[in-house]
Amino acid sequence: MAPNEASQHIGIIKLLKHFGWMWVGLIAVDDDSGDHFLEALEPLLSKEKICSAFTQRMPQKQRLENTWNAIARLISEFHKQFTESKANTFLLYGDTLTLQWLNNLIPVEDSNDMESMTFGKVWIMTAQIEFALMEVQHGSNMEAFQGALSFMIHTNELPEFEKFLHIIKPSLAQGDGFSKYFWGKAFKCKVPNSNGLTSGSRTCTGLEELESLPSAVFEMRTSGHSYSIYNAVYVVAHALHAMHSSGLKHRGTVGSKRLKLLNFKPWKLHSFLQGLSFNNSVGETVSFNDKREIEGGFDITNMVTFPNNSFQRVKVGRVDPSALEGRKYIINEDVILWHRHFKQVLPVSLCNDFCNPGYHKKNKEGVKFCCYECSPCPEGKISNQKDMDDCFKCPEDQYPNKDRDRCVPKIISFLSFQEPLGISLVSVNIFLSLVTLLVLRTFIKHKHTPLVKANNRDLTYTLLISLLLCFLSSLLFLGRPKKVTCFLRQPAFGIIFSLAVSCVLAKTITVVVAFMAIKPGSRMRKWLGKRLANSTVLSSTLIQTGICVVWLGTSPPFPDVDMQSLTKELIAECNEGSVTMFYLVLGYMGLLSIISFTVAFLARKLPDTFNEAKFITFSMLMFCSVWLSFVPTYLSTKGKYMVAVEVFSILASSAGLLLCIFSPKCYIIVMKPHLNNEQVLRRKNFRN
């Protein structure tokens, strides 16, 4: 009729976990039942990461050696564990005799002034110590157990039970020796025997009231054992009734043979008990599970003691494995009254203080895992709860705060039009675009002058338009990356720049061919004219265009978010798709630049008034310097600054070509128009 003790073990674990008591002392009676209790409980404690600060075995009274040395050794051991251990929670398993020993061993500075106590403990007692503590009450101080939490076999108040207790008198207990013995011990009197004689100083009147006794001697409420006995009587009654009914049915089938109930053997009752289920007088269902155990659990009570050594048990929770999910374990901590030492603050029972958020537990060598150090979380990790075993990384879109106890959302970073850097680049872009348009307008306006005609007007116009497009293409790199801008910006930049460099190369080749064609008998004259220049520009640009088409057709750029490169920012960027194709575009553009620079450098001293090779050499030197510096700088920067580096390189290299090639011509056309005639330009050397 008693619930399975495993339910009590589970309840103990849940109680310890609920209040965070991870460092507890175990006190168990030194017998087979104590061994079984420790063997069953300790693996559960370990599994839930709860440690035993110590394990103290309490001897049974008859087993303790009757020597002062043995008693003194026990007192010394317990006093040390009680006063020096950091454990504030003690788990007690045993019986009433165990509690008697414990009561004698608990150190108290002044038993008459409990306020002077320098320590207090939370006692967790098993159901084996739930009955009346009459022997403990005499000559002891119950206030040491103030706030204790006790497991009791589940009970409920039975109707008429208290009324029944009021009418109990020793004179009514005929043939019941226990009642007379209890009455005499409880009221410290002698009950008259059958012939009216008594021995002792005071005779029991029989008018004594049970409710006047301290609760440590007798509880007027229904105890767990009483409730179990009450249910047991009804279980047997229901089983006998079922057995009798079965016998009556059987008697009807056998005719004249009468079967008497007394003919049933006791073991035949088992089958009727197994399937039994009924509601008792308080409305609770009584039944057995498939293990032939009563369905039920344990109540959790809080012991409230009073100065007169009386106490009251207040029900504060329940453990019932058969209940619905969410109701298997119930605890109402608001009504719990703790030992006065804790001043009604939730007691703490730990080997060391909790590790605060931002720290994690670090095991100490040579001690139990409940004793540990608190170590700060490493860089890039956090802990957001107390006593975490390890720190963890934030999600990719978040980063740890300064205290490493929470994750902060990363801001999205990109080169915006509104920020100072973006505004500066746009302003420079607009300025250079306007300058390019102004130069183009100047050349168109003076297209019939010798200086403009001598430099291949169509090639000049193409170069200026390509430079204008280079400036404008850099705007694709600003703002939040989108599908269209990512798809266009690198290929557009590569094709337009290749067109510009091809024009420069064509100009250089034209100068070389023109010089070689003036020699007598030269076969290079057939290459003079627009055909060579156009072929150079078209073929060079088509090769770059082909590379970009393959790139866009196989693995095109697309919008992406880089979550790893920067700690506090998400980089909104364009993923280049195929990095190989990206560097192939840059490599081809670099190859054109090197060829143009080499040809221009070799032709820089050709004796021709219209020779542009010197200016082209210097412009390509600047162009190559910018892009050679671009590669390592681009690879070493992250986020919007990487984009800014590429935009700056586009603007700087384009401006270099514009400045070095066209500024001398514009100067003559605008500032020195008298030099812009065929006679002056044909001179080998002319001065401003």
Image (spheres, rainbow, N blue to C red):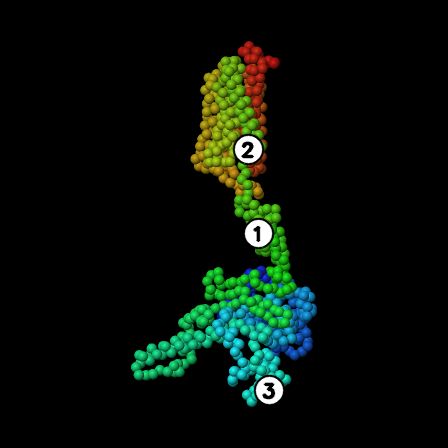
Q: Nearer the viewer, mark 3 or mark 2?
A: 3
At mark 3, the secondary structure is loop
Instruction: Place residue 662 in its image quadrant.
Output: top right
At mark 1, the secondary structure is loop
Q: Distance between the residues labelled 3 and 1?
A: 74 Å
Residue in view at x 33 percent, y 77 percent = 249
Compared to residue 544, the image places residue 114 above or below, namely below
Q: Distance between the residues labelled 3 and 2?
A: 108 Å
Q: Which of marks 3 and 1 is in front?
A: 3
Compared to residue 148, the image places residue 200 above or below, namely below
Residue in view at x 56 percent, y 74 percent = 211
Q: What residue type is labelled 1?
A: Asn
Q: Mark 3 points at which residue?
A: 198
Q: Do the residues labelled 1 and 2 touch (CB within 8 Å)?
A: no
Which percent across, then down, holds residue 260? 37, 82
Q: Nearer the viewer, residue 20 or 497?
A: 20
The mark that comes first in sequence, 3 or 1, is 3
Q: Residue 418 carries which label?
A: 2
Q: Can residue 408 be seen in this view?
A: yes
Q: Which amino acid does label 3 sit on?
A: Thr
The mark that comes first in sequence, 1 or 2, is 1
Q: Which mark is residue 384?
A: 1
Q: Quadrant of the C terminus?
A: top right
Residue in view at x 50 percent, y 13 percent = 448
Which percent across, then down, holds residue 56? 62, 70
Q: Is residue 634 visible?
A: no
At mark 2, the secondary structure is loop
Which percent across, then down, holds residue 161? 50, 74
Q: Nearer the viewer, residue 392 or 114?
A: 114
Q: Are marks 3 and 2 in contact (CB under 8 Å)?
A: no
Q: Are marks 3 and 1 in contact (CB under 8 Å)?
A: no
